[in-house]
C-alpha cells in the first residue's frame, strides 16, 4: 500500500449538478499535495468524500486501502472549511476534547504551538478574531500524529507573517511518511512547500504534476500557470 | 543567510545553486557539518523532499558527503570547492555575455566597456 488516498471512477452528483465526474486519483505516502481549482470545481466535495461526510454515487474512494469509516478517521486529521467547535469552549477544553477523541493527539505539541503563536489557552473561542480561530483549529489538527492531513482552505483568514509561520510549522511537524493534502487559493504562499499539485475543474482532474515539472516546462510559477489555465 | 528563491524556476535547481554559493562563500566551511534536512527545509521554507533531492545531487557531485550516523558534511577537498566556485563564476559571466548581446554589444565592445567601468570604479573607490 503505497497510496494513502485513492479514487477509482469516483462520481458524486448533487441535484442538477455533477460535482465529481469519474475521478481517478492516487496520492502517495510522504507527499505534500496541493489540491487547486477555481470555486465550485469539486475540491471540497472530494475532501468530504475522503472523510466520509458524503457518500459516492458510484466508484470508490479509499483511505489507506479502506473505505472511509471509523478506522480511516483514526488515520486522517481533517481541517474542514468551516468550524465545528463550540463557541463557549476555551482552548484548554478543546485540547482535552481532542485528546479524548484521538489516541494520536499530542498535547505537548499543541501547547508549544499555541505559545509560539501567543494564544492564551484560557481564552474562549467566542472572544477570538477570525484569524486566531483559524490558528487554533489548525493547531488542533496538526497536533495529531496522523497519516493523512487534509486541510481545506487552511490559511485564508491569517495574515501573511503568520501564514509563513504556519507553513514552517507544517514542514517541520508532519512526520516523514505522512501525506498532506491542502486545498487552497493562495497558491503563491504554498507552492514552495508542495511536492505535487492537482488541478481540478468542473469535477475533472485536469492535471497532476510536481511543482518543479510545471516550473521547468512552463517557465513560470504554479500560481501564474493556474491563472493561465483557469483564465476567465 | 536568507534564501532567495524565484517563483518562475524549479525550486530544486535554485536550492542547489544557493547551497553551492553558501559553501564557496564559506558560510558552510570545508569539512563542517550541515543542519538536518528538515531544519534546512524549514529555513528555506521549502518542501523537505525537494531539499533532500538537492542535497543528494550535491552529494553525487562530491561537494557534500554523508556519514551514516552523524549527518551530512561539506567536503574537505578544497580543490573541489574551488572548482564549484569557478563553475558558478563561469555561469554568471555567460549570463552577463548573453544579456550584453541582447543589448547589441559584441564580445570586444563588452570587454572594452567592462575595462572602462572597472577603471572608473577603481579611481572612485
Image (spheres, rainbow, N blue to C red):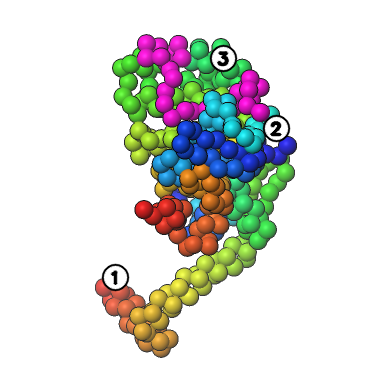
- Tell us which disc is closer to us: 3 or 1: 3
Q: Is residue A19 above or below residue B6?
A: above
Does any portion of residue B53 appear in the rendered image?
A: yes
Q: Residue furthest front?
A: A16
Chain ID, mark 1: B
Alpha-carbon distance for marks 2 and 3? 23 Å
Indicate left or right for A87 with B55 as reference: left
Depth check: B92 or A152 in front? A152
Residue A12 quadrant: top right
Alpha-carbon distance for marks 1 and 2? 69 Å
Provide the secondary structure element on which disc 1 rests.
loop
Q: Which residues are magenta?
A: A67-94
> Which residue bears the numbered disc 2?
A65
Alpha-carbon distance for marks 3 and 1? 69 Å
Pointer 3 and pointer 1: residues touching (CB < 8 Å)?
no
> Which residue bears the numbered disc 3?
A101
Which residue lies at the image location 48% right of the left edge and 75% below the top edge?
Answer: B94
Q: Is residue A169 above or below residue A188?
A: above
Chain ID, mark 3: A
Query: Where does the image place residue B54, in percent across and percent down from the top left?
Result: 59, 53
> Which residue bears the numbered disc 1?
B125
Which residue lies at the image location 50% right of the left edge and 52% below the top edge?
Answer: B27
Residue B107 quadrant: bottom left
Amino acid at each position: 500500500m503505497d497510496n494513502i488516498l485513492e479514487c477509482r471512477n469516483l462520481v458524486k452528483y448533487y441535484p442538477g449538478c455533477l460535482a465529481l465526474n469519474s475521478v481517478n486519483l492516487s496520492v502517495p505516502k510522504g507527499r505534500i499535495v496541493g489540491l487547486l481549482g477555481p470555486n465550485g470545481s469539486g475540491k471540497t466535495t472530494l475532501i468530504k468524500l475522503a472523510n466520509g461526510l458524503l457518500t459516492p454515487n458510484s466508484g470508490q474512494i479509499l483511505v489507506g486501502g479502506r473505505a472511509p469509516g471509523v478506522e480511516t478517521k483514526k488515520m486522517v486529521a481533517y481541517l474542514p472549511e468551516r468550524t465545528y467547535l463550540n463557541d463557549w469552549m476555551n482552548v484548554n477544553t478543546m485540547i482535552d476534547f481532542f485528546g479524548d477523541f484521538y489516541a494520536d493527539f499530542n498535547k505537548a505539541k499543541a501547547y508549544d504551538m499555541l505559545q509560539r503563536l501567543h494564544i492564551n489557552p484560557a481564552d474562549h473561542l467566542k472572544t477570538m478574531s477570525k484569524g486566531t480561530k483559524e490558528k487554533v483549529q489548525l493547531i488542533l489538527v496538526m497536533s495529531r500524529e496522523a497519516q493523512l492531513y487534509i486541510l481545506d482552505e487552511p490559511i485564508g483568514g491569517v495574515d501573511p507573517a503568520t501564514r509563513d509561520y504556519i507553513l514552517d510549522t507544517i514542514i517541520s511537524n508532519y512526520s516523514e511518511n505522512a501525506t498532506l493534502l491542502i486545498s487552497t487559493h493562495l497558491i503563491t504562499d504554498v507552492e514552495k512547500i508542495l511536492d505535487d499539485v492537482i488541478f481540478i475543474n468542473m469535477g475533472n482532474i485536469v492535471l497532476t504534476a510536481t511543482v518543479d515539472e510545471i516550473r521547468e516546462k512552463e517557465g513560470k510559477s504554479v500560481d501564474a500557470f493556474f491563472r493561465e489555465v483557469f483564465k476567465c | 543567510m536568507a534564501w532567495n528563491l524565484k517563483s518562475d524556476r524549479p525550486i530544486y535547481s535554485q536550492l542547489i545553486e544557493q547551497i553551492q554559493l553558501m559553501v564557496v562563500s564559506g558560510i558552510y566551511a570545508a569539512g563542517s557539518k550541515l543542519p538536518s534536512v528538515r531544519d534546512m527545509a524549514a529555513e528555506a521554507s521549502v518542501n523537505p523532499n525537494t531539499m533532500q533531492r538537492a542535497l543528494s545531487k550535491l552529494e553525487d557531485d562530491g561537494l557534500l558527503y554523508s556519514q551514516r550516523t552523524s549527518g551530512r558534511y561539506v567536503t574537505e577537498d578544497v580543490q573541489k570547492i574551488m572548482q564549484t566556485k569557478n563553475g558558478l563564476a563561469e555561469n554568471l559571466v555567460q549570463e552577463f555575455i548573453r544579456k550584453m548581446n541582447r543589448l547589441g554589444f559584441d564580445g570586444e565592445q563588452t570587454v572594452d566597456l567592462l575595462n572602462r567601468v572597472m577603471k572608473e570604479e577603481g579611481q572612485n573607490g
